[in-house]
Image (spheres, rainbow, N blue to C red):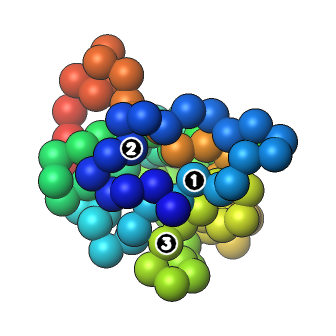
Amino acid sequence: MLPESALAQATAPSANAKPQCINTDNIKSYKIETDDLIRFYMKNGQKLTIRLKRKCPQLRFHGYLSYTPTNARLCTGVDEITTRSGLTCRISSIAPAKNNEANRGSY
């Protein structure tokens, strides 16, 4: 599991890499940017980019997602988000938001 406050070291996982995880208790809010990119705003002020393995149709249109964490964590390659219409999409990467991405605002 990635340390909650040290995700700045995160990179996209390779085929043999351990899953990257975030503690769901530390999520403050989220913003759906596209059908395959979600911005998570953490309680410590950190902004994370969550990429999905594929586009989740209507995810951005509805602006809603849900998830069922295991042991209060969301992990790449393991966990999925669910859209309002019930489609599930697997999380493929978790990384710190780049400077130009991080300045898009927060909730």
Q: Position of residue 12 (x, y in %)?
A: 63, 34
Does the CB distance between marks 1 and 2 fall below 8 Å? yes
As drawn, is 27 to the left or to the right of 64? left
Question: What secondary structure is found at the residue carrying circle 1?
Answer: loop
Residue at x 20%, y 33% (from the top left corner) = 105
Q: Which residue is mark 3?
A: 73
User: Which comes before the other along the chain, label 1 or label 3?
Assistant: 1
The residue at which mark 1 appears reads as 20
Classify mark 2: helix, strand or loop: helix
Measured along the vertical axis of the image, is residue 26 above or below residue 32? below
Residue type at the position of mark 3: Arg
Tag 3 secondary structure: strand
In this rendering, does residue 39 appear at all? yes
Q: Is residue 47 above or below residue 22?
A: above
Would you call the spot at circle 1 few (<14 residues within 10 Å), some (14-19), or many (20 or more)? many
Q: Position of residue 53 (x, y in %)?
A: 74, 44
> Image height check: is 12 above or below 53?
above
Q: Is residue 36 left or right of residue 31?
A: right
Q: 81 or 85, which lies in front?
A: 81
Query: How far separated are the C-alphas under marks 1 and 2?
Result: 9 Å
Toward which corner of the image does residue 106 lie, by quadrant?
Answer: top left
> As drawn, is 65 to the left or to the right of 54?
left
Q: Residues within 10 Å of mark 3 (few under 14, many from 20)?
A: some
State how far apart marks 3 and 2 are (Cα): 14 Å
Q: Is residue 79 above or below residue 11?
A: below
The kind of residue on which mark 1 rests is Gln
User: Which residue is under mark 2?
Assistant: 7
The reply, left or right, for residue 16 in relation to residue 101 is right
Residue 40 or 70: which is nearer the viewer? 70
